[in-house]
Image (tube, rainbow, N blue to C red):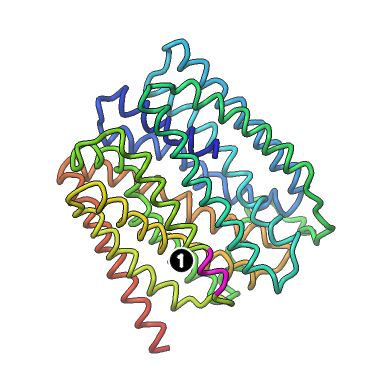
């Protein structure tokens, strides 16, 4: 919840500091999520070599420091676009190292037959925060209380670290490879290629992240330019969370994941995204974005479960780091590019084009898998 509160506050303060320049908002997303691209492969090696719970606790302390600095600068009116991006990058570094460790721990503390249900519950809990976080953030952002938002994130990060400390992680097989860092990174990539359909699942997640999820960087601009309501964008994010919870739960009760089902839902995601781009009013936008959220987390939860089921324990951290690159690491590239495209063709055309790419990829891969 603290993350979503701070994430929306970052967007709100950047919109305010740059007079709603979509390119700057895209750069903010790049700063926040690019560490997943840069550091997640290394973080995967770390998660396979050292104590995973300790990595997570250390990362949450890093987030606490960065968010506390954001709160101090906001309270003293010293924030500027570059300082916002710098501290967002610092938070992103912590997230990039905690992500593979957290995914691996989730698989360590449940039995294999319960893995799909556990990942679904984890996604559902995460998406509940996508609803409650924006709901809390909306009045704070409307009142310009950014320092409060960042302060709450600092406190909530400490609370999360305490919860992680209380988790009991059973013994698991650690990587005994004595090769160098980059050799171990490459071994994780090779393992994903060997364990079909892991690589195609990673490619599907990458397409969804770059051409689909990147549209969230334009939601603040969309709310003001298209809907005429700048303060409405937290509620649009909240509606995404409502749909995402439903998508995660649906995936959890379906049993074992199937890649063809995921690629078909990527096609439906693209259709819903184009419907959002053409929203004539706020109600339409909320319903459309809830549908987008449903298919987004249905696809991502299914792909994550599929990967967890096919990888070896000693290489789990490295393969899941590739998933975090596909999910979060490539997202800032799409957000940065989409922000620049929106400056040229407009927000509506940029989001519509993103939806069309998802439609074409989803249809193409679904038919290819069906023929095979």
Picture quadrant where residue 287 is located: bottom left
217 up-or-down from 253: above or below: above
Picture quadrant where residue 313 is located: bottom right
Q: Position of residue 33 (x, y in %)?
A: 47, 42
Q: Position of residue 150 (x, y in %)?
A: 51, 26
| Relative horizontal placement of residue 127, taking residue 212 as reference (left or right) | right
Q: Residues within 10 Å of mark 1 (few under 14, many from 20)?
A: many
Q: Is residue 17 magenta?
A: no
- Residue lying furthest left: 345
What span is in magenta? Answer: 249-253
- Residue lying furthest top: 76
315 up-or-down from 101: above or below: below
Q: Residue at x 40, y 57 (%)?
A: 293
Label 1 secondary element: helix
| Relative horizontal placement of residue 307, taking residue 331 as reference (left or right) | right
Overall secondary structure of the magenta stretch? helix
161 up-or-down from 338: above or below: above
Residue carrying label 1? 299
Q: Give the quarter of the figure containing the C terminus.
A: bottom left
């Amino acid at each position: 919840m603290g993350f979503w509160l701070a994430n929306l506050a970052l967007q709100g303060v950047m919109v305010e500091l740059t007079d709603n320049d979509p390119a700057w908002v895209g750069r903010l997303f790049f700063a926040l999520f690019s560490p997943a691209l840069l550091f997640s492969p290394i973080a995967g090696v770390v998660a396979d070599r050292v104590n995973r719970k300790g990595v997570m606790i250390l990362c949450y302390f890093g987030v606490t420091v960065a968010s506390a600095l954001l709160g101090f600068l906001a309270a003293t009116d010293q924030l500027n676009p570059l300082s916002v991006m710098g501290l967002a990058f610092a938070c992103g570094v912590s997230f990039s190292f905690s992500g593979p460790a957290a995914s691996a721990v989730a698989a360590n503390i449940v039995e294999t037959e319960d893995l799909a249900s556990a990942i679904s519950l984890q996604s559902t809990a995460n998406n509940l925060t996508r609803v409650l976080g924006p709901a809390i953030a909306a009045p704070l952002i409307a009142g310009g209380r950014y320092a409060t938002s960042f302060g709450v994130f600092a406190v909530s990060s400490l609370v999360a670290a305490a919860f992680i400390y209380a988790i009991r992680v059973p013994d698991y097989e650690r990587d005994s490879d004595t090769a160098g860092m980059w050799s171990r990174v490459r071994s994780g990539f090779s393992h994903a290629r060997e364990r079909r359909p892991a690589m195609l699942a990673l490619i599907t997640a990458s397409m969804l992240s770059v051409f689909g999820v990147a549209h969230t960087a334009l939601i603040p601009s969309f709310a003001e330019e298209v809907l005429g309501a700048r303060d409405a964008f937290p509620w649009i994010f909240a509606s995404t969370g409502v749909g995402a919870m439903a998508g995660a739960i649906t995936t959890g009760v379906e049993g074992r994941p199937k890649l063809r089902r995921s690629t078909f839902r990527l096609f439906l995601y693209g259709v819903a995204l184009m419907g959002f781009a053409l929203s004539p009013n706020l109600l339409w936008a909320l319903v459309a974005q809830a549908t987008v959220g449903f298919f987004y987390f249905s696809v991502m939860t299914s792909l994550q479960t599929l990967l967890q089921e096919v990888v070896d324990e000693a290489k789990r951290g490295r393969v899941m780091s590739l998933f975090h690159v596909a999910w979060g690491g490539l997202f800032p590239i799409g957000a940065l590019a989409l922000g620049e495209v929106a400056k040229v063709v407009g927000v509506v055309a940029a989001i519509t084009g993103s939806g069309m790419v998802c439609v074409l990829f989803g249809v193409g891969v679904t038919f290819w898998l069906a023929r095979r």
